[in-house]
Image: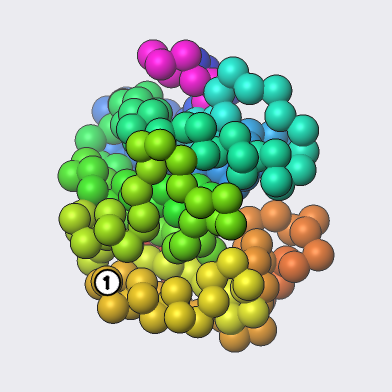
Amino acid sequence: MRITLPSGTPAILARPRPEPPAGFEHGLVLLPDVFGLRPLYDDLCGQLSQRWGTVVCAPEPFPGRDLPPDVPARLAASREIPDADRLRDIAEAADATGCTRLSLIGFCQGGTYAYHASQLDRFARLVAFYGPVRPPEAGLGPGQARVLDTLAEGRPGRVLALLGGRDPLVPEDDAAALEHAGVTVVRYPQAGHGFAHDPDRPTHRAADAADAWHRCGDWLRL
C-alpha cells in the first residue's frame, strides 16, 4: 500500500500475510533508482516482503516533484536535495516498518544512499546494487557529501556492493576504492548497470540477478 511519511514523502509499505500474532521482527528499507517509485517497486516490495517474511518500506526519492522520465533532469533535481533530507526519509521509512531489526537495500542512486546510510546505527546490514561512488558530471549539490568520505565516517563493514564488471557508472577503480574503504564487493564480470532489479531492462541478466539476490538475502541474514 502507499503511505505518507511524517516528512510528507510518499512511500510504499508492504507487509507479508498472514501476520504472526507477535508481529514482525525484521524491517527492510528499499531505496529506488533514479526513476523513483513506480509499479515495478510496488511489485518488488510485495515480492520481497512475502519471500523473506519482512516488512518493506520504500520512500520516494523525489517527493513533491513532477519530473520527466529522463536521467539528466532527475540528476539535476538530485543536486537540490541535501543528504540530510534523504537520510531523514530513510530513518522515517525504517520507523514505518515498526521493526527493531532493520536492513537496507538500494539500487543505482539508491545504492549510493545505501553507502551514505552506513553512518546510521539502526541498520545492521546494507546492500548497494550498482550504486555509483563518484558524483555525476554535474557534481554534488549543497549539503551533499562524497561517498568515500561518508564511508570513512560510517561503518562500511556492514555494506555489500553488488557490481557489474561492465558498468560504466561504477568502473574498476571505484570498485577497488569501495573495497579499500572496507565494503564487501562482489563483481559480475559480464554484467552492466541495472542487471538485477528490473527484468524488463535490456541489461538484465537472469543468472547474475539470481546469484546477486541470493547473496543479498544471505548478507541480510534473511
In the displayed structure, 184 sits above or below 16; it is below
What's the residue at 70%, 55% (across, down)? 198
Q: Which residue is mark 1?
A: 181
Left or right placement of residue 108 versus residue 104 in this view: right
Instruction: Give, as a three-letter code, the residue at label 1.
Output: Ala
Element carrying mark 1: helix
Left or right placement of residue 182 versus residue 206 in this view: left
Model colouring: rainbow
| Quarter of the view holding residue 64 | top right
Residue toward you, 50 or 174:
174
Residue toward you, 155 or 44:
155
Residue most toward the bottom? 189
| Quarter of the view holding residue 54 | top left
Q: Write down the region rendered in magenta.
A: 5-11
Q: What is the quadrant of the N terminus in the image?
A: top right
* Residue 170 in view (yes/no): yes
* Residue 208 in view (yes/no): no
What's the residue at 27%, 58% (across, down)? 149
Measured as percent of width and height from the top left, residue 91 is found at: 32, 31
Left or right placement of residue 3 versus residue 36 in this view: left
In the displayed structure, 93 sits above or below 220; it is above
Measured as percent of width and height from the top left, residue 63 is found at: 55, 23
What's the residue at 56%, 56% (across, down)? 136
Q: Residues within 10 Å of mark 1 (few under 14, many from 20)?
A: some
Measured as percent of width and height from the top left, residue 115 is found at: 36, 55
What's the residue at 28%, 78% (across, down)? 180
Residue toward you, 217 or 68:
68
Q: What is the quadrant of the C terminus in the image?
A: bottom left
